Amino acid sequence: MYMTAVSVGELVETVYTSDLRKKTYHYYMATPTAAPNIALAVGLVLLCANGVVVHCGVNFLSDF
């Protein structure tokens, strides 16, 4: 499993370092939002997509 970042807004770009060990995520929010309403989660996550409904859930793993 890999560390990943999940945040509000639209992911517009992921920038990797030259050795591909680190990444920087760039998000864009079209609606002005106060800082306390912006969330960021970084860690080991398992992304699951439901094939019937266009929906994506995130399960956070607790054993890292």
Image (cartoon, rainbow, N blue to C red):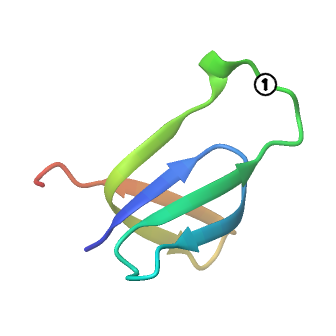
Residue at image coords 38%, 82%? 19
In this figure, which residue is indicated by the disc labeled 1?
33
Q: Nearer the viewer, residue 16 or 48?
A: 16
Determine whether 62 is above or below 3 in the image.
above
x and y, in percent, of residue 23 in the image: 47, 66
Image quadrant where residue 41 sits: top left
Determine whether 11 is above or below 34 in the image.
below
x and y, in percent, of residue 4 in the image: 41, 61
Is residue 27 left or right of 59 when viewed as pictured? right
Is residue 19 left or right of 17 when viewed as pictured? left
List the single residue furthest toward the front: 18
Q: Nearer the viewer, residue 47 or 38?
A: 38
Tag 1 secondary structure: loop
x and y, in percent, of residue 6 in the image: 51, 52
- On-image quarter of the N terminus: bottom left
Is residue 10 left or right of 32 when viewed as pictured? left
Tell me which amino acid carries mark 1.
Thr
List the single residue furthest toward the left: 63
Residue at image coords 35%, 55%? 59
Total numbered badges shown on the rendered structure = 1
x and y, in percent, of residue 40 in the image: 50, 39
Determine whether 12 is above or below 40 in the image.
below
Residue at image coords 58%, 59%? 25
Q: Nearer the viewer, residue 51 or 57?
A: 57
Q: Nearer the viewer, residue 11 or 63?
A: 11
- On-image quarter of the C terminus: bottom left
